[in-house]
Amino acid sequence: MFNIAILGMGVVGGGVYEVLKNNAADISKKLGGNGETLVTVKHVLDRRSFEGHDLASIVTTDFQKILDDKSVSVVVETMGGAHPAFDFSKAALESGKSVVTSNKEVVAKYGDILLETAKRNNVCYLYEASVGGGIPVISPLLNCLTANKIERIAGILNGTTNYILTKMLFEGEAFDTALKSAQALGYAEADPTADVAGLDALRKICILGGIAFGKHIPTEKAAICEGITEIDKKDIAAASKAGYSVKLLGVAEKVEDKAYLMVAPHLVKNGTQIASTVDVFNAVSVKGNMVGELVFYGAGAGSLPTASAVVSDILSAIKCPVPETPRENCGDGFCLEAKEMPVKIYFRTDAPAGELCGEIIELGDGERAVITEVATYGSHCAALDALKAKNYKILARHFVLK
Ligand code: HSE
């Protein structure tokens, strides 16, 4: 019998409870049992009393009670927010309990400290559910791809914004209506600004880039963080004319011994897995120097898909609690500044074709769009500034996935 505690019975915590209940017999067999319940939720930390629900007898508002219970070996942190989630996770690890989380904010901010605390106490800090919802991507990076140097990770890492873009583009829904349904479906963050402004995807690309490049990379080191609010239907139409779809991507790319990390809308070539990824689904492309390109695809948010990843981590913590090697903070100088990134950009302008270099898409009404070759972002910006100096307008600027 293994006792666990769940901190936060929200969308993900509730999903974890449901998965453990519904799949109890299978989980038992995977742990060597005969179908009897082997993983028991002994405590739930939540402000609500859950009157009339079977959670009522195990819910508490006192974290110390969980910490003091020596029979609890795994603490599941599905609270969201940086504090007290970080403090509770650290205390649990220090008291010899493994911690499993879906909290990307905590992993992105304090992953280095928590992995080090776990290692020191010979327990695990597991966070598969923090990126890509139900998609296994962290474990493959940590385990199956270690023979490779990872050259680039690029993908759709936020289900809410991909859902909103899909609803707006294919079903003609207004932004607010699409956001409301993403919230009702349990996809969006408590404050959906983190989704819409790109911060949630930034946390995720920093977690993945950190694993890929062997360093803890705080979000402040990223070069660019843009959300979906500046995407104009005119640019979606222009992209489509040139054979691209517009997607909000997180990108982490190695450039010699440095790297850049960013989140921004990108034009992605139609026919690729990423361009075809719609609704709440995520797709993460990983390029290794030996394996080539792999694409991980699946439900990127939602109660049960995310709980699927959390529960798998609970079982890993129970079966084989080997602490992960902590990563040091990347410090200064590892991450390139925005102007140094080697990128392709897209822009829309009223400048005449004779003033422009790259693939030109004529849009009518005196407007045209341009897809450039790869150059530093600084040199692209200088070229756009030169057009502005001649009184031409830059009406939109996005990136193009290389
Ligand atoms: N708000 C997040 C998303 C939840 O939409 O992707 C999953 O991390």
Image (cartoon, helix red, strand yellow):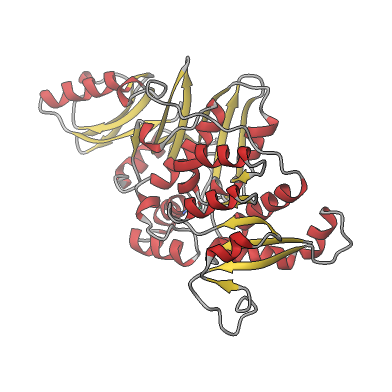
At a point 66% along the width and 28% down the height, the residue shown is 145
Residue at 70%, 31% in the rendered image: 144
Quick one: 346 or 313, which is closer to the camera? 313
Quadrant position of residue 364: top left
From this view, report whether residue 331 is shown above or below residue 74. Answer: above
Q: Residue at x 47, y 47 (%)?
A: 106
**In the drawing, does residue 77 fall left or right of residue 33?**
left
Describe residue 170's horizontal placement relative to residue 228 as left or right: right
- Quarter of the picture containing the N terminus is bottom right
In the displayed structure, does residue 175 sit left or right of residue 214?
A: left
Q: Residue 15, how many percent across, how many down?
A: 61, 64
* Residue 273 pos. (x, y %): 57, 38
Query: In the rendered image of this protein, does residue 361 appear above or below residue 107?
Result: above
Name the spot of residue 55 as percent of width and height, x first.
62, 75
Count of numbered marks: 0
Looking at the picture, tell me which residue is in the foreground, 307 or 279: 307
Q: Residue at x 44, y 39 (%)?
A: 249
Outermost residue, bottom direction? 52
Q: Is residue 156 visible?
A: no
